[in-house]
Amino acid sequence: MNTAKRKLRVAIFGFRGIPHSYGGTEPFIGELAPRLAAKGHEVIVYCRRSLFRERPAFYKGVRLIYLPSIETKKLGTPTHTLLCAVDVLFSKVDIVLVMNIVNFAQCAILRLFGQQFAIMVDGQDWKRGKWGRLAKSYFYWCAKHIGRICPRGVITDAEGMRRIYLDEFHTPSACIASGADIEVSTRPEIVREYGLEPFEYYLIASRLVPENNADLIVKAFEQVRSKRLLAIAGTANYRSEFVKQLKRTKDPRVRFLGHVADPGHMKELHCNVYAYLHGHSLGGINPSLLRALGCGNCILALDTPFNAEPLRGYGILFAHNANDLAQKLQDVDDHPDLAAEYRRRAPERIREAYSWETITEQYEEFFLRLVAGEDPTRTHSSVVAVETGFFGAEQQVWASQTETRDPRGTGLKKG
């Protein structure tokens, strides 16, 4: 069968919708869905009606359907996704892409009625601090059993996450990462609207939840002798004691920008930063880390398998320890040449493995193979997946390259 010429009808749900800037899933689908549509596929994205004041019928060639939800911290996603699962059964689509393991029950509905679907399981929701004990237990149960509900359609976005699902849950998956664009500053004056000067600030850009470790980063920054500021772009979408504690810092160099909704502003904040600080501890590969690479950032990231996978050789990894980060921040602050070298090399990693063209082709081939009755989660052996990534893209190219230790001991450089 020549799957390359087949055009699919694809539906995507399990998140807030597009265009939306909160979180990592929304920008990801905002890039992937239009690119699939540009390849000739009919793409439908379901959006949570109450989160969109304007409700156009199409976005960059993607059809948008708005359904209601009960907008609370715990009910927003499941209530909306339940309606999506019912609606899509009457839509005659070839393949459904469900986002996030928390939508396990809705996947069961699709399976029950014979709808072909895949699920991108995202991170380790059973470890996220915002959930209580009961919710964590449920999410772990979902992850443990998703392979039974979706035996040929599980997608992970990092080799480390693929191994967790395989080793801990005995569930094979296709490893397809997110992507990023190569971006450069066109309006550097925008950062001044936030009280910043180009290359005179550090940046955190994430949801302010405990597992993203903004508190550890602030504690480390308070120890650094620097005239540069620390800008924190992000918030939590619910009442958070963690955010309240974070804002009690007495360091006047720490600036809280809140949620930056304008993509153009976020781009300028990235493209004009001295160094980007990434504290995400639960993975996969976070899209904000790939964006930082694409924007040419000098990156200091928490040393986890999910951060090391795309970053090794292209950034600096720090231990889950404020003193370790403070030392590496001080080194970067004292040596602008080191920071500039990391900024210069960062976009190479996107060209090498994480371009949107590569990622879109991988998703397209995954869908085509699944619809054709194949098992795309078993296409390659784990050895090949480590070296080349899913469908041959060089996502894990660092694993087979020669690496040498940076002379200052702050990171790795590609040899």
Image (cartoon, rainbow, N blue to C red):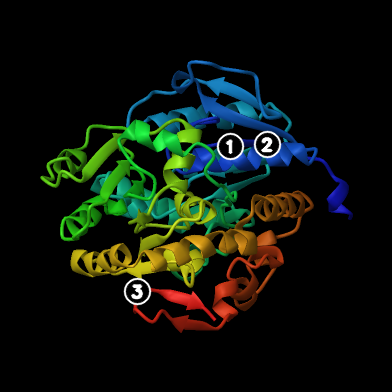
Residue tagged 2: 34
Marks 3 and 2, the one that precedes in the sequence: 2
**1 vs 3, front mark:** 3
- Residue 7, percent across and down? 82, 41
Tag 1–tag 3 contact (CB < 8 Å): no
Say which amino acid is labelled 1: Gly
Q: Residue at x 33, y 67 (%)?
A: 335
Which image quadrant: the N terminus? bottom right
Report how far apart the C-alphas of labels 1 and 2 lie in the structure: 7 Å
For label 2, the crowd category at 10 Å Cα-Cα, with few meaning under 14, some 14 to 19 and many 20 or more, is many
For this view, does 397 lie left or right of residue 260?
right
Q: Quadrant of residue 412?
A: bottom left
SS type, badge 3: loop
For this view, does 400 lie left or right of residue 234?
right
Say which amino acid is labelled 2: Pro
Tag 3–tag 2 contact (CB < 8 Å): no
Residue tagged 1: 30
Which image quadrant: the C terminus? bottom right
SS type, badge 1: helix
Near-viewer residue (251 or 1): 251
Report how far apart the C-alphas of labels 3 and 2 lie in the structure: 39 Å
- Residue 237, percent across and down? 32, 33
